[in-house]
Image (cartoon, helix red, strand yellow):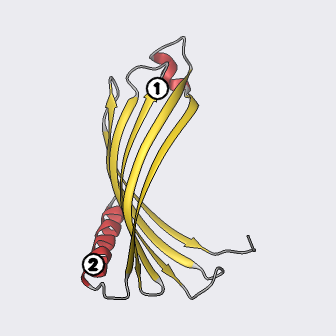
Amino acid sequence: MKFAALACRGLAATCLFAFTSLHESAHANEFLQLGVGIGNEDNVPRVAHNPSAAESGVVTTSFTGGKYFQIGLNHSLVIAARLEANRYFEHRGFDQLGASFSAAYTYKFGLGAYSPTLGLSVQHGKIGLNGEARDRRFTTTEFSFEKRLSPA
């Protein structure tokens, strides 16, 4: 938990540095994304709530918006917010409505498609469940190292 808090503070400091040091050569692009999904979820513990339904159909909708900053040649920063809703057909009390925001910093070691990248991402949000289950808050931290090994 202390590690996640430290990573959040580090990314917040990076974002603050990026915003205060943006200069004429920094580029920013906004993005919006709408997602709709239909699926089937099978979760055995839910049988206790409704013994006749061990699985349920679910519809998921989401809307994400944010801004991508290209800071210099090798640095990029993405700030985003997301709203998401899940509706279950056979189960009651598990419908969800959530909101989150995230920040992701990426450093690219050189130019070209085969250059490795190092990334840090932090997301914080809240999911509210409609019914018997509890609401929850979450914070996720992700470190990544990516390297393309073969042509597309």
- Name the quadrant of the C terminus: bottom right
Image point 35% across, 28% down: which residue? 133
The answer for how far apart the CA atoms under marks 2 and 1 are is 41 Å
Vertical relation: 88 (above or below) 62? above
Q: Position of residue 147 (x, y in %)?
A: 63, 75
Occupied quadrant, residue 124: bottom left
Kindly indicate whether the residue at mark 1 contacts the one at mark 2 (C-beta within 8 angstroms). Answer: no
- Residue beneath disc 2: 19
Element under disc 2 = helix
- According to the image, label 1 marks what residue? 88
Instruction: Out of 137 and 105, give the one closest to the viewer.
Output: 105
Numbered badge on residue 109: none
Query: Crowding near pointer 2: few (<14 within 10 Å), some, many (20+)?
Result: few
Q: Amino acid at mark 1?
A: Tyr
Q: Residues within 10 Å of mark 1 (few under 14, many from 20)?
A: some
Label 1 sits on a secondary structure element that is strand
Q: Residue furthest top?
A: 52
Of labels 2 and 1, earlier in sequence is 2
* Quarter of the figure with residue 4: bottom left
Q: Position of residue 108 (x, y in %)?
A: 52, 82
Q: 50 and 110: which one is in front?
A: 110
Indicate the position of residue 39 as horizontal and vertical percent values. 57, 32
Question: Total number of numbered labels?
Answer: 2
Q: Is residue 82 left or right of residue 38?
A: left
Residue at image point 43% right, 34% down: 86
